[in-house]
């Protein structure tokens, strides 16, 4: 087996880039090449609400006046959507480098951390998931999966695919439905897969981008050590945030496992999938590009290939699609800032997005991220659109069409 097991190793120290030593790192030096064009502020979904959008932050950095930026809470509106990063003509990684560093300082100076966010971060540290659920229940959904799901600490034989399920798919009832659908599709396709079960903890990406550096490093180190216990060829995860964390952040801890998100992974099986998609459907479907999967990792065509393979389904595009997608508002800690945004009178991005989805005339809003299911289902309800449109993970639509 081409094993990816690294065994036990000593963990290298985390990269210690800071606002003071930016010029010592290539990513930091790039920040300083900003031409103050304002594209970042113009493209930001909350740009008009930010006292200090990225362009102004860099201006203040150059003027030595960052302390003023730290005392404004406007950067809490940043949902880490990568729009500014994707559009910056200087290729500055605002979302991955500058904004978390500034956010960290903003959070340190807040008189009070928004309660929902505080709770989620504490829960991740204490229980390994933002909901505060018992780690012992992480694999409880497996009992009702309808197909066998191997848990590695019970049966540690080598496996082809280590499926990193993540928190929302493990605990949240709608997420569990997606987990069951994924298990059934993997099973029907003959994928040799297993999960970490109760040994898995949140990959921590949003902790990183809402900058809780200590928490993030703790989760990374823990997950790397657990992964190192087993032999597998590939990690597949259904969560774009975990995918993002593994691909771009865990590399600091020598993560070099072969990695796929569930959607590109399943497109590798298209030839085997197509003859099994027997149930003809009659819906119009529109696809929401997740920021982490789309804008940050250029996975645009694979979700559409799978949707178009479902017989009878008609794919229609929203005005903002692919690199221009509008964030669901859940990234960078936004998942736990809805109450905070509401108190400030801001429009939730999930509501902005579903208005656009409904305007396409589609019946189904297809997604590839467990965060989006809860955010969009809630937004449809709040706006009174729940009879016009349903939200489905692409894997759920495949499972339905396969009748598994
Ligand atoms: S888009 Fe890039 S170059 Fe333009 S102002 Fe923003 S950070 Fe500077
Ligand atoms: S990452 Fe998104 S929300 Fe944050 S500043 Fe950039 S464009 Fe705005």
Image (spheres, helix red, strand yellow):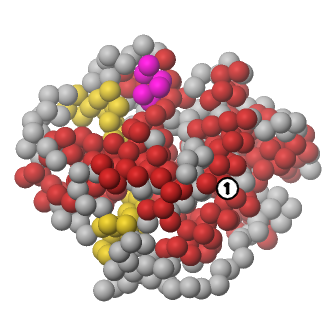
Q: Please tell me which residue lies in front, 107 or 120.
A: 120
Q: Secondary structure at mark 1?
A: helix
Q: Is residue 199 magenta?
A: no
The overriding secondary structure of the stretch rendered in magenta is helix
Answer whether residue 263 is visible to the viewer in this image: no
- Would you place residue 302 above or below residue 190 in this image? above
* Residue 361: image location, x then y, percent: 29, 20
Report the front residue among 190 and 292: 190
State the extent of the magenta-drawn residues as a range: 376-381
| Nearer-the-camera pick, 153 or 55 | 153
Q: Quadrant of residue 22?
A: bottom right
User: Is 129 placed above or below 29 here?
Assistant: above
Q: Is residue 346 left or right of residue 311?
A: right
Q: Position of residue 199 (x, y in %)?
A: 50, 65
- Residue at the image point whose x is 46% and y is 41% from the top: 172
Q: Quadrant of residue 308?
A: top left
Q: Which residue is rendered at x = 87% and y = 43% of the image?
A: 109
Q: Quick check: 59 left or right of 188?
A: right
Label 1 Cα neighbours within 10 Å, binned few <14 / some 14-19 / many ≥20: many
Q: Is residue 282 above or below residue 149?
A: above
Q: Quadrant of the N terminus?
A: bottom left
Residue drawn at x 80%, y 62% is 18
Write the residue at 24% across / 40% down: 397
Residue designated by label 1? 125
Q: Position of residue 246 (x, y in %)?
A: 52, 64
Q: For this view, does 69 lie left or right of residue 74? A: right
Residue 178 coordinates in the image, percent (x, y): 34, 45
- Is residue 272 at least partly visible in the picture? yes
């Amino acid at each position: 087996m081409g094993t990816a097991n690294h065994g036990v190793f000593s963990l290298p120290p985390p990269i210690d880039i800071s606002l003071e030593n930016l010029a010592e790192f290539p990513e930091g030096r790039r920040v300083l090449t900003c031409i103050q064009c304002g594209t970042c502020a113009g493209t930001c979904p909350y740009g008009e609400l930010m006292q200090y959008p990225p362009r102004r932050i860099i201006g203040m950095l150059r003027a030595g006046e960052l302390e003023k930026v730290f005392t404004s809470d406007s950067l809490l509106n940043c949902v880490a959507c990568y729009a500014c990063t994707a559009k910056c003509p200087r290729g500055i990684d605002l979302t991955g480098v500058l904004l978390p560093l500034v956010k960290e300082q903003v959070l340190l100076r807040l008189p009070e951390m928004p309660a929902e966010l505080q709770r989620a971060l504490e829960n991740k540290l204490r229980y390994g998931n933002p909901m505060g659920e018992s780690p012992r229940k992480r694999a409880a959904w497996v009992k009702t999966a309808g197909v066998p799901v191997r848990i590695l600490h019970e049966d540690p034989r080598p496996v082809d695919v280590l499926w990193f399920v993540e928190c929302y798919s493990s605990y949240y009832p709608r997420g569990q439905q997606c987990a069951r659908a994924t298990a059934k599709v993997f099973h029907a396709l003959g994928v040799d897969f297993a999960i970490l079960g109760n040994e898995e903890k949140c990959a921590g990406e949003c902790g990183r981008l809402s900058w809780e550096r200590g928490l993030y490093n703790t989760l990374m180190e823990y997950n790397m050590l657990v992964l190192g216990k087993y032999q597998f060829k590939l990690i597949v995860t259904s969560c774009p945030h975990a995918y993002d964390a593994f691909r771009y952040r865990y590399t600091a801890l020598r993560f070099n496992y072969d990695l796929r998100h569930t959607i590109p992974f399943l497109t590798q099986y298209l030839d085997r999938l197509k003859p099994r998609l027997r149930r003809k459907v009659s819906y119009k479907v529109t696809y929401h590009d997740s920021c982490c999967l789309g804008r940050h990792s250029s996975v645009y065509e694979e979700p559409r290939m799978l949707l178009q393979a479902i017989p009878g389904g008609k794919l229609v595009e929203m005005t903002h699609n692919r690199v221009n997608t509008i964030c669901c508002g859940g990234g960078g800690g936004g998942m736990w800032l809805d109450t905070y945004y509401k108190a400030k009178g801001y429009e939730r991005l999930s509501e902005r997005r579903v208005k656009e989805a409904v305007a396409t005339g589609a019946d189904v809003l297809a997604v590839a991220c467990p965060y989006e299911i809860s955010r969009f289902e809630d937004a449809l309800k709040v706006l009174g659109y729940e009879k016009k449109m349903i939200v489905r993970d692409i894997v759920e639509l495949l499972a339905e069409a396969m009748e598994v």
